[in-house]
Image (spheres, rainbow, N blue to C red):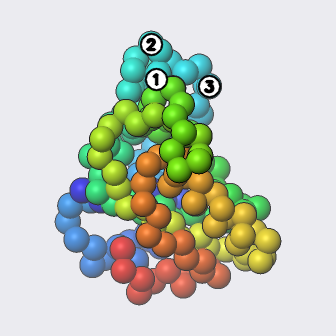
Amino acid sequence: MRLIIHDLDQADFHRISAHSPGDQRVVSPGNGSIAHCLGCFGCWVKTPGACVIRDQYGDLGELLAQCKEVTIISRCCYGGFSPFVKNVLDRSISYVLPFFVIKDGVMRHKRRYAKSARLRVWFYGEISEQEMATALGLAQASAVNLWWDLVGVSFFRDAAELEGQML
């Protein structure tokens, strides 16, 4: 399964996803409001693998474990993800375990699931060279932390430029 996490409005997303293959799930602001992560670590201690906030985003960790590919489409905010996308990733922390391991000289959380996914990140907006460098580093760090293979990071001037890209 492929997961698409995006912050686009529905019309922009529909234009770029009209010809997408069928086996995919979409997490977007159109799915409803998302509560902010409480930082309580309940997803590690109280309800392992699931967020203690039981809304439609409470099982993001398990959803990520089912994916072979994850595509993140985000407005670039000062070299980072948009608030919505950042919140989705924060709420997905149950995907990994609270313990640490050193792999390839980098400390990271231990894996909860043996499966790995391919990660593609598309940033859009007016992005400076410095913000691009920061965003690239963030995408690389996200892939490392989640035990995924980063297969591409792309930058676009605006959401309209995404049209015609292969999802």
Q: Residues within 10 Å of mark 1 (few under 14, many from 20)?
A: many
Quarter the C terminus occupies? bottom left
State the residue position of label 1: 43
Quick check: 153 above or below 80? below
Tag 2 near tag 1, CB within 8 Å: yes
Q: Where is residue 64 in the image (x, y as percent from the top left)?
A: 36, 45
Side of 159 relative to 23 (left or right): right
Determine if residue 134 is in view. Answer: yes
Q: Position of residue 32 (x, y in %)?
A: 45, 44
State the residue position of label 3: 39
| Mark 2 element type | loop
Q: Where is residue 68 in the image (x, y as percent from the top left)?
A: 29, 57
Query: Which residue is situated farthest in the left direction here?
Result: 22
Which amino acid, mark 3? Gly
| Front residue of this view, candidates 99 and 1 | 99
State the image quarter where residue 4 is shown. Answer: bottom left
Q: How far apart are marks 2 and 1 (CA)?
A: 6 Å
Q: Position of residue 153 (x, y in %)?
A: 54, 72
Which amino acid, mark 1? Cys
Query: Which residue is situated farthest in the top direction here?
Result: 46
| Mark 1 element type | helix
Identify the mark nearer the N-term, 3 or 2: 3
Side of 141 relative to 14 (left or right): right
| Front residue of this view, candidates 18 and 98 | 98
